[in-house]
Image (spheres, grey):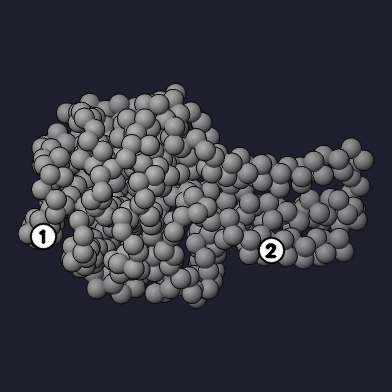
Amino acid sequence: MGLPLTLYSHNQAAFAGGEVLRSMLVFLLIATLLVVILRRVVTNRVLADALATAPLIGIWLLGLGWQLYLLMSAWLLTCFILRNWKLPDNGVSVFNALAVGVVFLPVFTIFQVERISYGDWAQRIPYSPFSAATETPMGADKPDIYHIVLDAYAGSDVLGGEMGFDNSVFFDELRSLGFLVNESIIVPYNETVHTMSAIFLGEYLREGEFPIESSFPPQLRSTLGALIVRGPVHDILRNNGYSLLYTDPGHEFLRFPNDAVVLQSKNNGPLNRFELHLGMVSGLQGVLPSLYQVTDEDPLIRSVKDAFKNDFGEFESPKFAYQHVLAPHTPFIIDRTGSTTMEFPGFTSTAEGDTVVLDDPARRQAYVMGYLEKLRFVNARAIEQIRKLRALPGKKIIVLHGDHGSGSKYWLDDPNRTCLRERFTSFLAVYTDDPDIRDEFGWITDPSATPVNLYRSVFNALLNLDLEMLPNKSSFVRYSAPHQIHPLDSHRIPLACN
């Protein structure tokens, strides 16, 4: 039971708590069966209990490869040698303490993260210009705001220069629909939660100041994920009568408030997201391929497809709708028509960068092919949805952008090996049918633009504020240490990569 808990405690920003329960019960059942069997072989019951945990830990650490078979052989030999060994009395206490720790420590971590994620801190961050404006009233004519994020969507410089793909049709279509478009905007960070938190704070994150205080990655990511959906921007909108709507991204990195209206995707598949991840890290996918086979009901397919079907027309105005789509980000299990595909077997999870490309040219080429296949699907569905949103009555603002670029040459912990151009180049497009609001977004097409200014412009227009536009700057955040922000030389980012 402790092993699924531990996996969940280190990945709370990816899965819902309820998704771990079935795995805990299965592991508990397996451990119980092993204990019953070993107590018939090993004389000392406590030693039998301790030995029963070894196969589960082996699966956890090694998967089901040849290393596990070697370990299992050693384990069977150990059980045979120690079958009549008597454990000293103080040894019993040690094993009991370890057993309690295996369960208590991840539970303590989980509760700490949940407490931080759902606290009342998000609305009061002094360096955000929006914190002082949460009670400022808007005028009577409040536009609906639709904010759509396409995760890991690369800019045209990268798509054309690094991948050989001409994406001009998509961007030209956006312009024909009235959007202001920057095809190759430089994003502030290489990670989703950092970029989106900065956008909703209207300010760059500050190392050593909240929320970049915790050095524990799950807690920090959960805190940043909460800022994306319930920070000062959301307070301003809520206090001005907006209803706040969110779509299910198929990933638990957004820490929705308890009273949020979340348009959930139905999960009709045999396994939930946590179970799919557990199967990947344990190697069970190879042992039980029929159980882990990708289908149309995969939660990471269903959430993408369902998101693009929304037009939010059934909700009263004024409304703010935030839609974060895990696409064209991995997994590459959707082809350009929306059909399920297993043509890219190395990229069936949300893992990206060097963890799945492995610095292998063939795998990198497969990544690019899978990425472009999914991007073609995203382009078609995004245009369809935007046409529906534009047709809705009333004034509106539609924001469409990527949070960071693709990851075929991305090292999660190494900015020097990462192709910065690929990871930090995305796009930004904004539509509004209000000429006065549109004037506030003239900066978007500037080569030095940054998406951190998005809500500065929105609230300059809606609250009559006079916030300056920030200059562009970017920093690399190592995945293993997301609290450390490493500023980048802006001249390095546009350089082509080998």
Q: How many numbered discs sit on the rendered protein?
A: 2
Q: CA distance from mark 1 to mark 2?
A: 52 Å
Classed neighbour count for the residue bearing mark 2: other residues with Cα under 10 Å, few (<14), some (14–19), many (≥20): few
Residue at x 46%, y 55% (from the top left corner): 260
Which one is in front, 305 or 230?
230
**Which of the labelled discs sits on residue 461, or is there none?**
none
Label 1, secondary structure: give it: loop
Quadrant of the drawing holding the N terminus: bottom right
Q: Which quadrant holds residue 345?
A: bottom left
Residue at x 47%, y 51% (from the top left corner): 256
- Identify residue for label 2: 25
Amino acid type, residue under disc 2 in the picture: Leu
Classed neighbour count for the residue bearing mark 1: other residues with Cα under 10 Å, few (<14), some (14–19), many (≥20): some
Amino acid type, residue under disc 1 in the picture: Leu
Quadrant of the drawing holding the C terminus: top left
Residue at x 25%, y 44% (from the top left corner): 139
The reply to whether residue 175 is visible in this rendering is yes
Which one is in front, 275 or 365?
275
State which mark lies toward you, 1 or 2. Answer: 1
Q: Residue furthest front?
A: 140
Q: Which x, y percent locates residue 60?
A: 60, 53
Q: Is residue 237 above or below residue 208?
A: below
Q: Which x, y percent locates residue 203?
A: 31, 31
Q: Which quadrant holds residue 188?
A: top left
Left or right: residue 366 versus residue 471 is right
- Identify residue for label 1: 177
Left or right: residue 171 versus residue 333 is left
Q: Is residue 85 above or below residue 199?
A: below
Residue at x 63%, y 51% (from the top left corner): 5
Label 2, secondary structure: give it: helix
